[in-house]
Image: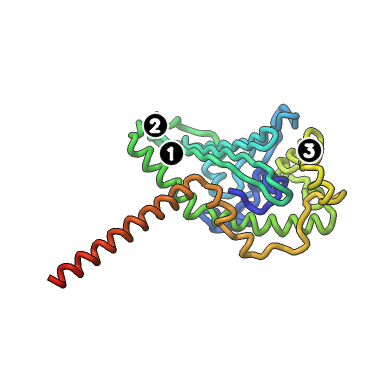
Amino acid sequence: MCPPVDWLLMTENSVDPGHAPFLHEGVMGSDTRAGAAPMGMALGPDGVAPRGFTVSHTGYTVKSRVGGMKATRTFVAPGALRTHYVYDNGSEAIACVYFTPISPGRCATFAKFYSRAAPGGEVARDAATGTVAAKPARAPRVSLASRFLSWLLSTAAFHLLGHALSDQDVLVMSGVARKLSTAHKGWRAYWLATPADVGVAAFHRWFQDHAGGAVDWDPAVRAAAGAGVPLPLTAAAPTRAALLDHWDRHTAHCATCLKALARLDKARVVLAVVGVVAVAAAAGAAAA
């Protein structure tokens, strides 16, 4: 995707999972605000280094905490984030996203997702101690056909439903960017000294201490942005329609979508030819 969101905010958003039940309430299985839970987050033992950092955190909804979710988010400089979720029942999921600054106020994202269902057998969690009472059985073999179907369904689900989440992110982050730019304020204007913002603080510490505190844009672009404005924006705010333009944001840059469009174009030509032949055949039969 190539959303109209600045690289800095886009990357920061990925290390701030606690926003999900509030911004994405009820979308694509997201929990509601009432289901949100306090999230514990801690910086890894290596701290914030030039190569990046790692934070570990608990679930941020009641449902995920009951499931014993544990997650690690590893930021690899300059723009890669790998998130690994593990649950008590043995299921896990991995999301790898690479954020690439295209221009001030625009960022390209490349993502890959992997998930593994819970193995056979059940895992019991002791409510008092929080310990796991049983080890899950070995996962059964999965056929090639099942893997292909899983890939097909996940790809289709992402393209049909995934925009619902990114639409909300884009709308909110666009507004945040304009407010920060207009007020000439940075991330400390909204950061809170709570466990939930450990990832946000770590990312901005890396950006300031190890990345120079600014994206190395072309000198002409940097000069046009002006000093002290972290997120240079145009004078006019983008319209809602422009922000939610899926063609510009995703389709025009997606190999899967472009292949599908090319196949649809070929299918239209074939159907048109078949239609002409069918009409001609029907006219000839009527004349006879």
Dot placed on the residue nearer the N-terminal end, 1 or 2: 1
The residue under label 2 is which amino acid type? Ala
The residue under label 3 is which amino acid type? Arg
- From this viewpoint, which residue is outermost toward the top? 46
Instruction: Give x and y (percent) for residue 156.
Output: 44, 50
Circle 3 is placed at which residue position?
A: 205
Q: Secondary structure at mark 1?
A: loop
Circle 2 is placed at which residue position?
A: 139
Q: Secondary structure at mark 2?
A: loop
Instruction: Give x and y (percent) for residue 113.
Output: 51, 40
Contact between marks 1 and 2 (CB within 8 A): the answer is yes
- From this viewpoint, which residue is outermost toward the left? 288
Residue that appears at 74% across and 45% down? 194
Q: CA distance from mark 1 to mark 3?
A: 36 Å
Circle 1 is placed at which residue position?
A: 117
The residue under label 1 is which amino acid type? Ala
